[in-house]
Each structure stands twice: as C-alpha cells, then as structure tokens.
Amino acid sequence: MHIDTITPVDSAWQERALCAQTGADFFFPDPGSSVREAKRICGMCEMRTACLDYALANDERFGVWGGLSE
C-alpha cells in the first residue's frame, strides 16, 4: 500500500517578496483591470522564481504569481 505524505511548503520567500510590502490589490485585481503594475513589481522581485514555483505546485489560477497571470 502506498501512502502519500504532505510535506509543508517553505513559505519564507513570501515574507521577503515585494508583494508582501505592496498589498494584494495589485496582484488580485478586479476582472478586466490591468496587471501591468503587478508584473512590473514582480520583475524587480528576487523571490519571483520561488513565487512562480509555488503557484505552479499549488495550481494557483487567479492573480499574478511570479510575474505571470492566468
């Protein structure tokens, strides 16, 4: 019998990410709103790769993650 274990996600990157200092409004805008500013902020963030990895691993479908949107 095979049992999958859930391993905790290292979320330390979230504390150091620029979005943590900016606020969620840029990264989860209303439908039809621009995400240009969020992508610009992501482009300057050192945690961009960790953010994108997290989004892909957790099937995040909404918002801007790692500089990309849905």
Image (spheres, rainbow, N blue to C red):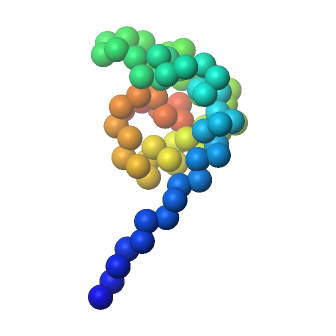
Residue occupying image coordinates x 54% and y 36% = 66
Q: In the image, is residue 31 above or below residue 46?
A: above
- Tally of numbered tags: 0
Q: In x, y percent, where is residue 11?
A: 58, 47
Residue sitting farthest toward the bottom:
1
Please say whether residue 22 is visible from this viewpoint: yes
Q: In the image, is residue 55 above or below residue 10?
A: above
Q: In the image, is residue 63 above or below residue 14?
A: above
In which quadrant is the C terminus drawn? top left
Q: In x, y percent, where is residue 58?
A: 41, 49
Please say whether residue 43 is visible from this viewpoint: no
Residue occupying image coordinates x 69% and y 36% = 16
Residue occupying image coordinates x 49% and y 34% = 65
In which quadrant is the N terminus drawn? bottom left
Residue occupying image coordinates x 50% and y 47% = 54
Q: In x, y percent, where is residue 3?
A: 35, 79
> Picture quarter containing residue 35?
top left
Q: In x, y percent, where is residue 56?
A: 43, 48
